[in-house]
Amino acid sequence: MPSLKNVKPVSDIVSNNKNNQVPDTDPFMPDIAGSLSDFFSNSPLREFSDNLLRSVPGLPPVVQTIHLLGVAVIVGSMVFLCLRILGLAADRQDPYEMAQRLFPWFFSAIPVMFISGAVFFLARPQRYIYNPIFTIKTVAFLLTIIASFWLWKYRSELKANTIRLSTKLLAAVVMTGWVITALAGRWIAYSDYIFWPE
Amino acid sequence: MINAVLTHEFWLSLEYLPLAEQIGATWWFPLINSLHVLAISFMLGALLMLDLRAAGLAANRYSIKDLCKDFLPWIWASFVVACITGTALFITRASAHMLNPAFQWKMLLMVLAALNMVMFHRQTTKYRLADIHPENFPVILKLSGIVSLLLWAGVTLAGRWVGHIV
């Protein structure tokens, strides 16, 4: 458990929030966001990431570009595979062959995405933990990655001449899920527009 | 000459268009920006598959011709959306963007990517190469696929950098 001595003052925690609203805490509910925030704020990785992003010139846009190119790889592999399964794209390619060829690209992109994202998360954990859009992104990501593994597990269904409706529905979920995750990622920086309008 | 273009008052006048003010002052900006990112990821996702095939590194069981038919409509449609949304973002700060080195690099790299694409297209159609076996595909055109990917990665980096300078 984090010690109370090292807890940052509330003013620091919400400094990113435009109207300086203090998150409401219910005395009878465990403060999950607070505990997470304390844990990451006090971790040595926070200082390391923060220093890294500040001291290496040009590193923030470079890491963001790696993250962005990772999004393109996920779209190129998973989203286009799902579009193929739904009969909306790439109809000159075989869906099962596509799955065998493209899933490794998707699986390689995930750790790259996780690390390039974590550098930013660890540098300023409060900015993300108290951001409702980040919560949406996390939930969308977790559901979509589970659905993606499910699609991988049942890929032999794609050998059939007519792909079953359940497989198509799963593909629709996976495709929509990745688009929502990517859009939520972009909106993390814009949450003020939704939650604290001028 | 080039400075006269970059600093021309035309760019400033774009910022005073009612549309530019509407975009810059409201939630239209983040909405258009996210559509821009989405269009880019669809374009690059499809382009990645096509370029890797052109380089002979992936999907060699399909002809370049077939993959072009599969992916070029997606690439062009996404590119058009990216251009429209990009212009909409550009006019909100046109005069500053024209002098922003990251923006200048982005435009330069896009011109180079276009030249590379025209060269690839002319060679493959002239010598009817789109159907041939990957082993017989000229090395210079395989390199062109790699160069395309590097240039577009550069465009992405420069585009992302624009926001760090303005």
Image (tube, coloured by chain):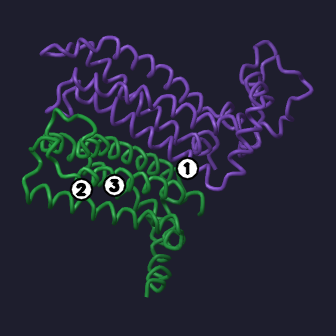
Does A135 appear above or below A27?
A: below
| Mark 1 chain | A
Q: Do labels 2 and 1 share a chain?
A: no
Report the disc number at residue B160: none
Q: Nearer the viewer, residue B40 or A92?
A: A92
> How far is the residue under mark 1 from the one under mark 3?
19 Å
Q: Nearer the viewer, residue A34 or B150?
A: B150
Q: Are marks 2 and 3 on the same chain?
A: yes
> How far is the residue under mark 2 from the one under mark 3?
10 Å
The colour chain B appears in is green
Judging by the rendered image, the residue that carries numbered circle 3 is B147
Q: What residue type is labelled 3?
A: Val
Q: Is residue B11 left or right of residue A43?
A: left
Report the disc number at residue B140: 2
SS at mark 2?
helix
Judging by the rendered image, the residue that carries numbered circle 1 is A62
